[in-house]
């Protein structure tokens, strides 16, 4: 059984755990560097990226997480996408710089501007999963402003990339764990 870690410092890590369990994976809540060694890949959930950075520093997890990402797959949702990006603006902040993307924080607006949308994924996504629209929950979501040449856009919202992969890593600026659609998590599990 695949052991999929979920960074459990902040955010709705339990919702990711339920989704992984529905797909037959073993969710493992990760809070320490030692626990990283026991998982095949890691989800960094949504939450508040500045707070996550503070907690990662407090727990001495920042560098172990960077090293983990050089060897194993990471899937970042919302704040997790911000942490995986190379460039972060609005305001600028440190990141893990594991994906060649630039992200603008809270770019769709304030909490009141959060929404649920239907996405028509790119053909590459549909070819690797079941076809059909994706339900996407955006909560104070970032916008991916630049996608480097090694990264591929798998879905867009209002012409902005919202689901991007690069090698073994995957980011979503929305929250797939808040829907019943398991295809995005399934795509991640296929990388383990």
Image: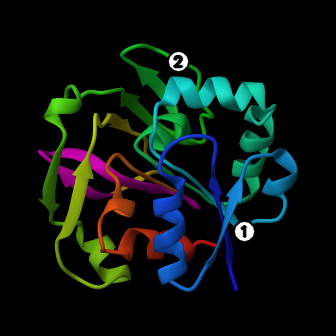
186 and 26: which is toward the camera: 26
- Most foreground residue, 50 or 97: 50
Q: Most extreme residue toward the right, as rendered?
A: 34
Is the residue marked by circle 1 packed among few (<14), some (14-19), or many (20+) residues within 10 Å? some
Q: How many marks?
A: 2
Front-most of residues 123 and 37: 37
Q: Residue 11 placed where, x, y %? A: 49, 44
Residue 75 lies left or right of residue 29; in this view the side is: left
Residue 188 is left or right of residue 117, and the answer is right
Local SS, label 2:
loop
Q: Which residue is mark 2?
A: 93
Visible residue check, residue 82: yes
What SS does tag 1 mark?
Answer: loop
Query: Who's the residue at 49% across and 71% down the image?
Result: 18
Residue range of the region highlighted in magenta in the rendering = 154-169
Q: Is residue 191 magenta?
A: no
Magenta region, main secondary structure:
strand
**Residue 51 location in percent, x, y?**
55, 25
The x and y percentages for residue 154 are: 32, 61
Picture quarter containing residue 127? bottom left
Residue 40 is tagged as: 1
| Camera sees residue 108 | no
In what quadrant of the picture does the C terminus appear?
Answer: bottom right
Residue located at (78% from left, 32% from top): 59
Identify the disc placed on residue 27: none
Give the percent coordinates (x, y) of residue 70: 73, 50
For marks 2 and 1, give the CA distance.
28 Å
Q: Magenta includes 157?
A: yes
User: Is 97 situated above or below 32?
Assistant: above
Instruction: Please name the colour scheme applied to the rendered image.
Output: rainbow
Q: Are marks 2 and 1 in contact (CB under 8 Å)?
A: no
Residue 180 higher or lower than 38, as above or below = below
């Amino acid at each position: 059984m695949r052991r999929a870690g979920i960074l459990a410092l902040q955010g709705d890590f339990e919702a990711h755990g339920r989704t992984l369990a529905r797909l037959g994976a073993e969710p493992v809540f990760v809070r320490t560097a030692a626990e990283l060694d026991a998982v095949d890949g890691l989800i960094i959930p949504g939450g508040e990226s500045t707070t996550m950075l503070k907690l990662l520093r407090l727990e001495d997890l920042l560098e172990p997480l960077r090293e983990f990402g050089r060897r194993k797959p990471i899937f970042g949702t919302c704040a997790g996408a911000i942490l995986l990006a190379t460039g972060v603006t609005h305001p600028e902040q440190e990141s893990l710089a594991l994906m060649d993307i630039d992200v603008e924080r809270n770019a769709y607006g304030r909490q009141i501007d959060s929404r649920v949308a239907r996405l028509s994924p790119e053909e590459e996504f549909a070819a690797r999963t079941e076809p059909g629209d994706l339900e996407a929950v955006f909560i104070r979501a970032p916008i991916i402003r630049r996608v480097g040449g090694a990264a591929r856009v798998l879905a867009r919202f209002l012409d902005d990339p919202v689901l991007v992969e690069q090698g073994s890593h995957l980011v979503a600026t929305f929250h797939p764990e808040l829907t019943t659609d398991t295809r995005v998590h399934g795509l991640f599990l296929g990388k383990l």
